[in-house]
Image: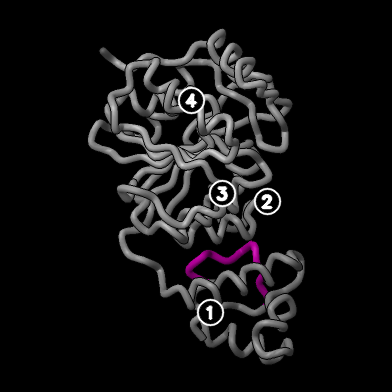
Amino acid sequence: MPVSLLGAAEIRRLAADLDVTPTKKLGQNFVVDANTVRKIVQAARVTASDRVVEIGPGLGSLTLAILETGASVVAVEIDHRLAERLPATAVAHDVPEGRLTVIDADALRVDALPGEPEVLVANLPYNVSVPVLLHFLETFPYLRRGVVMVQAEVGERLAAPPGSKVYGAPSVKAAWYGSWRLAGTVSRQVFWPVPNVDSVLVAFDRDADPRGTEEHRLRTFEIVDAAFQQRRKMLRQALAGVLGGTAAEASARLEAAGVDPTLRGEQLTVEDYARIAAV
């Protein structure tokens, strides 16, 4: 039998059975619309041959939509009640044995995934979305692509180009790993409870080759953090503390990297920052 999806009534019933009251802290706005979870899966280009890691499956609406394609899923869930219930929900919806693995853990502490999944799919709350994404990209180099649903502010920042108003440290750090793009909007009305913010889908494709070593990445991110702590200052001032201790020394190093010392941090690409870190 094909895998069936959760409906709105069943989601509310499951939440009642588990005594789950959706909380802002855990970002528990559950998706109750089948078309939306299928839209997310389609945006992630999930096929039957894929191994997928899902972060924050909740009650399983998106999980079942992924499994509906024939893919296998490793689901990472921080809420013990939800993690314990998810396998039974999968069985009740005709998921074949062995296709779903549930890890009951905080995604920020996960350092191993069975089967080395190559696709990431997630519905992430505002307060942890960027740290979780960067942790997974740093820790699991076999992740090749993915789609995450996040608050619009977060998604727009992740996909922002240099020079735009929302371009920031998360934009640069995400770009270290590959390319990012907005992949669709999500209506507030598909969530229970209905949130008071807009959501978007943001997709990424990891670069075929690593941009640099771990040491180079750490140095680059240090420089990025310094640049965006003082957004409106010229680079020679903002980076003095991490490039020699003085504005003059920072200017010399920036020029050696081919970067104008009078620019501001929000004007630089990830390639610019990587060159600075290599000097």
Judge left or right: residue 120 versus residue 15.
left
Residues under numbered marks 1 and 3 in contact, where contact means CB atoms less than 8 Å apart: no
- Residue tagged by mark 2? 165
- Residue pictured at 66% horizontal, 68% vertical: 225
Kind of element beneath mark 1: helix
Magenta span: 262-272
- Sequence-wise, which precedes: disc 2 or disc 3? 3
Kind of element beneath mark 4: loop
Residue 138 versus residue 57 in the image, above or below = below
Distance from label 1 to label 3 (Cα)? 21 Å
Residue 259 versus residue 21 in the image, above or below = below
- Residue tagged by mark 1? 277
Check residue 97 in the rendering and tell me which mark sits there, or answer none.
Answer: none
- Sequence-wise, which precedes: disc 4 or disc 3? 4
Dot in front, 4 or 1: 4
- In the rendered image, residue 25, in percent from the top left (x then y), is placed at 72, 38
Kind of element beneath mark 3: helix
Q: Amino acid at mark 4?
A: Gly
- Residue pictured at 30% horizontal, 25% vertical: 69
- Residue tagged by mark 3? 158
Distance from label 4 to label 3 (Cα)? 26 Å
Question: Can residue 91 be spotted in the picture?
Answer: yes
- Sequence-wise, which precedes: disc 4 or disc 1? 4
Q: Amino acid at mark 2?
A: Lys
Residue 209 versus residue 16 in the image, above or below = below
